[in-house]
Amino acid sequence: MQIAGAKQACPACGSADIVVCADRGRVPVFQNARYPDPATARDVARGHLILAVCRRCGFGFNATFDPHLAQYDAAYENDQTISPHFLRHVDAMAGQALAMVADRPDALVVEVGCGQGGFLRHLLAAPGGALGGAVGFDPSLRHPVDAGGLRLEARLFDAAAARSLATAPDLVILRHVIEHVDTPFELMAAIRATMDLAKPARILIETPCLEWILQHDAWHDVFYEHCSYFTAASLARLLRRAGFTKVAVTHVFGGQYLAASGEAGPAAEAADPGEGAAVAERAAIFGHSFEAFVARWRERLAERQPLGIWGAGAKGVTFAALIGAAVPVRGLIDIDPKKQGSYAAMSALPILSPAEAAGQGIRHVVVMNPNYASEIAAMVADLPSPMELTIMDAAP
Ligand SMILES: [Zn+2]
C-alpha cells in the first residue's frame, strides 16, 4: 500500500498481504454524537476512511484510522435498547452469556466497554441467573455504581483494572467494542493476559459481520467509528492467536452481527481460514460499487417525497450524508428522546420523533435497518397521516 501513514500490516493476523478496497475520503468521526444546531452538526471533526482487507485472514480495517480523533467520553451516546426487536436480541445475548457461566457458582462477569451498564443490569436481573457479581468498565460511563453486586467504573479495562477485581472473572464480555479498536490483537492479548489458567475465564464478543455488509452492499454500515470489520473466520482466528480455545462463532441479529465465544487456553498461531483472498475479492467489488450505490438510492428516493430517514443511529446518519443534498430529506426519525431535537452529523438534518415527522408532512420513509421494519410499520400505522416505507435491505 502506498498511502502515507496507512497501516502496512493486518491488525488481526499481522500479514502484509493487504489490499485497499475503497477510499471514502474524509468522513465524520462520530455518527452517534448529538449536535445542538445545524452549524455545529455540519462542522464536525472528520477522519480519512480507507477500507482495506487482509488477503490472509479476511479481516477488514480502516488503514488510515487515527485513534486520537475517536476519543469516547461521557458525551457519547449509543443506546439502541428502546426498540422491542433490539431488546429481544439483547435477551438472546444475555441468555448466551448466562449459559456460558451456568457451571460456575457465583460467577463474576466483567464487561469491557459496558456503556452505561445496561447489559450487566440485564444479566443481574435475568430470571434464573445467579451471578456472584458484575463489573463494567467504560470511559464513557456517566454514573459510576457500586451496589447490589454491580460495579461500574469510568475507565478503560487494563492490567490495573483487572487487579482491582476481587476474584478472577469467569466471563469477559465485549459487545460492540472490538470494531472501535484499531489494534484488536493487542486488545485481545491484553485481556487474555489478565486471565488465570487455573480457572480459565470465558469470553463472549459481539461485533458486526463484514460478510453481511458485503452481501447487502451496505455502504451505510461503513463509517469512521468502526475501524475493524470481522468475518466469522477472521474473528475465530484472532481469538485463537490471542490465546483462546474452544472458539465458536455464530451469526446473530438476522446475520448483521457475529457472536464469538471461547475460553482462555494456550496461544496458537491458528491455521489460515483459506478464504481471505475471496473476502478481499468481494470487498474489491464492494469498493467499486460505491458510486452506483449512491446514484441508485438518489434516483430511487427522488420521487418519494416528502422524505424522512427512519433511524438516527450510525446507519441513518451515514446514509443521509451519502445521499447528500441531491435528494431533499426533511429529517431523521428516531424513537429515542435523547436524540430528538438534535441534528445529525454532516447532513445537519433535524432528528424528529415519529409524531413530529408526521406533523412536518413526511409521507415517505426509508427504513435503515430491515430488522425494525415490522415495528416501524406498526408505529407508522398509529400516526395521524400515512407514510409509505422503503426498506433498506438487499441491493434494490
Ligand atoms: Zn489478517
Image (tube, rainbow, N blue to C red):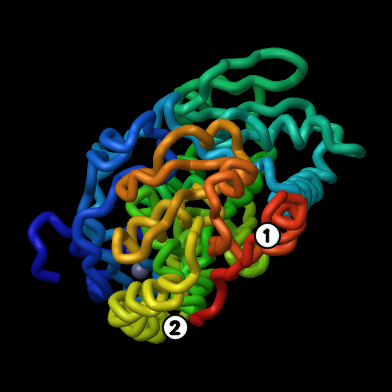
Q: Residue at x 66, y 42 (%)?
A: 81
Task: Tell me how far mark 1 sits from mark 2, CA to CA.
Answer: 47 Å
Asked if residue 228 can be seen in this view, the reply is no
**Disc number placed over residue 386 in the picture, else none:** 1
Q: Is residue 102 left or right of residue 35?
A: right
Amino acid carrying mark 2 in the image: Glu
Circle nearer the N terminus (1, 2) = 2
Q: Position of residue 135 (x, y in %)?
A: 63, 27
**Disc number placed over residue 275 in the picture, else none:** 2
Closer to us: 336 or 308:
308
Amino acid carrying mark 1 in the image: Pro
* Location of the N terminus (image quadrant): bottom left
Q: Residue at x 39, y 83 (%)?
A: 282
Position of 223 relative to 286 (above/below): above
Can you tell me which quadrant of the image ligand 1 is in?
Answer: bottom left
Closer to us: 150 or 167:
150
Q: Residue furthest right?
A: 128
